[in-house]
Amino acid sequence: MTSGDVTTGQAGPGPGSTGPGSSGPGSRAPGSSEATQWSGARNPTRRPVLRSLLTIGVVASVFLVCLLVLLGILGERLTAQVIVTSALMAIVPLFVIVPTYLWLDRYEAEPTRYLVFAFLWGALVAVVGAYFLNTFGLKILVEARWTDPLATGAVYLAPVVEETLKGLGILLIYLFRRREFDGIIDGIVYAGLIGAGFAFSENILYLGQAYNEYGSEGLTATFLVRGLMGPFGHPLFTSLTGIGIGIAVSARRPAVRVLAVVGGWLCAMLLHGLWNLSALAGMEGFFEAYATYQVPLFLAFVGFLVWLRRREGRLIGRYLSPYADAGWLTHAEVTMLSQLRLRRAARQWARQTGGRPAKRSMEAFQDSASDLALLRSRLVHGTAEPDAQGRELVLLEAITAHRRAFVGSPVT
């Protein structure tokens, strides 16, 4: 199959085609060899299951070790009561940050397990790694009798260490779960949750230290700056790395992919360094920097997110239209799938018509269609994964099955 062909014989189903009604065991992608068969039978080997269990075990073990280390770091500096109080205050910004990034991820929601992985990577692995590397780097600066090692560490060392460790989490998802990484929006979502997790754990330490040194006033001032004035700091910094990796997903040339990733990472470090530099300029300098470039930059970023979400809706409509022409979807369904308002109305209709089972089928139908559209985009641009043709057939079969389920479900 070429990148310009839709998986169907002609304009509609016919003998030998893979249109609606012909999917299932024995169906094959047009243009493939006679020996290439797509089967719906389950894989009898246990190897994929064992590999998944081993992967989950290793990841869970790493997170658990990092959690124990983090608790040890906090326990050396803070009492249990201060840790609990600081943690409760550090949770507050998450009620704004996490919904914002999930709002962006409405058309083609990422698997929950990867979103949880991203948050825990930031909250545990990146924070613990940054603590030891920053401490080690600061020790070297002190032993070298560097002029003002604290300022140097904050402006130069910390941004490099922290943005590298946070960006590594996005890169791991990109490298090992390539199918779930469709572009810039996915990069921003994963980056935002990694940054949110990092900020959460870091805020516990900063809030607790402020309370120990300055009491309730110090705790309140620190919460004001880190929790209310700059809650999107770490998510915004790391989002630049996510944008770079997202650009790399759709780039054909390896050199462009490398430049995009490196460029995003460098921009993240630069912005992080500027933020830390403004914090060292005293309260007057901080508020001046906050008003002159930090707030405008944040507003520009919000505008960019809104534009990205609308653009994704247009892309879904564009890349699903050929499937409507071929008979897999109706054009009315494509219109519905490309607008969040209509998608929400369709879920409500399914719930009223067939109860919760129908609503779940409609949600699965919408998710599969969005995934198909983004896969189609990669096929057209020549950046799809090697098994994209098989994945396309699987998604088409899923769309057909989900539609049948919510249309035919009885009211419960």
Image (spheres, grey):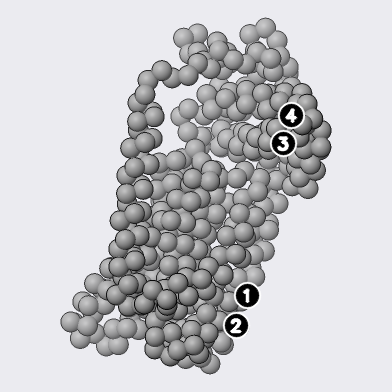
Please report contact status of discs 1 and 3: CB closer than 8 Å, yes or no: no
Q: Nearer the viewer, residue 289 or 169?
A: 169
In the image, what residue type sits under mark 2? Thr
Q: Residue furthest left?
A: 143
Above or below residue 53? Residue 227 is below
- The residue at which mark 2 appears reads as 292
Which class describes the residues within 10 Å of circle 3: few (<14), some (14-19), or many (20+)? Answer: some
Secondary structure under the numbered disc 1 in the rendered image? helix
- The residue at which mark 4 appears reads as 406
Sequence order check, earlier mark of 1 and 3: 1
Distance between the Cα atoms at labels 2 and 1? 7 Å
* Residue 250 placement (x, y as % from top left): 52, 44
* Residue 335 placement (x, y as % from top left): 78, 38
* Residue 161 placement (x, y as % from top left): 34, 66
Which class describes the residues within 10 Å of circle 2: few (<14), some (14-19), or many (20+)? Answer: few
Q: Nearer the viewer, residue 402 or 37?
A: 402
Above or below residue 195? Residue 330 is above
In the image, what residue type sits under mark 4? Phe
Secondary structure under the numbered disc 4 in the rendered image? helix
- The residue at which mark 1 appears reads as 296
Q: Quadrant of residue 296?
A: bottom right
Sequence order check, earlier mark of 1 and 4: 1
